[in-house]
């Protein structure tokens, strides 16, 4: 009973850290989009600087999970809970990197006025932020229905990104002098689309946790 209690307490600490990582990523992405919309380079620099905190959270999860495995020697689903926590922390850390990449685009814009109002990028970001929240909840609640929802949301993000590509390439053809900024905006779209892919990975890992089988949510 004591070993089980210690394991459950350690697992709860992992869950708390994962929730914090998810909140950090969601906020970082939201602020990165704000920095882009407002040409706020100070905010962009702050986002990039704060990425180190996310890296530390990932290291803490790896340390805590490794300690649980060594001391408690979990098996079956208990072991999967820790392994999946490792995978989720890696996906979240990469999402944080992508949010920082969006902020770096703000710095590269060097205060330029936007060539067009941002429409698709904020829409993509809103969907992706919901995906981040839902993916973490799917793990914490072991909710496979919510995990499978990731694929549907990811399809919406992909559709917006495809639309954005078509519009910006057309814009570059008609306004070659603005091609540099258009390419930067395409990069932002790609970064956000990749965040959605990582959220889908978390959904897949949740299904693996619950069922012991790895699905492909994109099928």
Image: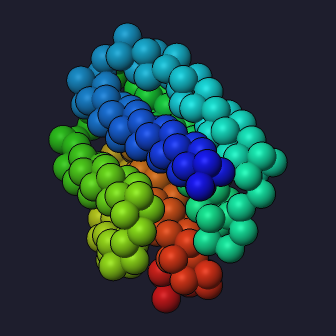
Residue at the far front in the pictured view: 1
Q: What residue is rendered at 67% in x and 34% in y?
A: 59
Q: Position of residue 184 (x, y in %)?
A: 46, 40
Q: What residue is rendered at 20% in x and 49% in y?
A: 119
Q: Position of residue 17 (x, y in %)?
A: 49, 38
Residue at the far top in the pictured view: 42
Seen from the viewer's position, the closer of residues 97 and 60 is 60
Task: Locate the N terminus by quadrant.
Answer: bottom right
Where is residue 164, by image quadrant? Answer: bottom left
Where is residue 137, by image quadrant? Answer: bottom left
- 56 to 198, vertically: above or below: above
Q: Position of residue 214 (x, y in %)?
A: 61, 81
Seen from the viewer's position, the closer of residues 69 and 134 is 69
Q: What residue is rendered at 41% in x and 58% in y?
A: 140
Q: What residue is rendered at 50% in x and 31% in y?
A: 100
Q: Position of residue 128 (x, y in %)?
A: 34, 55
Seen from the viewer's position, the closer of residues 173 and 61 is 61
| Left/right of residue 80 with respect to residue 132 in the rendered view | right
């Amino acid at each position: 009973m004591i070993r089980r209690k210690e394991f459950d307490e350690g697992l709860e600490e992992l869950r708390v850290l994962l929730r914090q990582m998810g909140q950090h990523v969601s906020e970082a992405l939201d602020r990165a989009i704000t920095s882009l919309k407002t040409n706020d380079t100070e905010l962009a620099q702050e986002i990039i600087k704060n990425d180190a905190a996310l890296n530390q959270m990932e290291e803490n999860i790896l340390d805590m999970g490794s300690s649980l495995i060594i001391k408690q020697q979990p098996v079956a689903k208990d072991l999967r809970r820790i392994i999946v926590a490792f995978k989720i922390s890696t996906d979240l850390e990469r999402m944080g990197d992508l949010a920082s990449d969006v902020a770096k685009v703000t710095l590269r814009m060097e205060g330029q006025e936007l060539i067009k109002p941002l429409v698709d990028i904020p829409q993509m970001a809103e969907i992706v932020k919901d995906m981040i929240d839902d993916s973490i909840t799917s793990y914490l609640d072991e909710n496979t229905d919510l995990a499978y929802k990731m694929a549907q949301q990811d399809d919406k993000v992909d559709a917006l990104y495809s639309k954005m590509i078509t519009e910006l390439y057309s814009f570059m053809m008609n306004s070659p002098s603005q091609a540099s900024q258009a390419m930067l905006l395409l990069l932002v779209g790609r970064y956000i689309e990749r965040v959605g892919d990582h959220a889908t990975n978390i959904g897949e890992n949740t299904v693996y946790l619950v069922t012991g089988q790895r699905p492909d949510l994109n099928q």
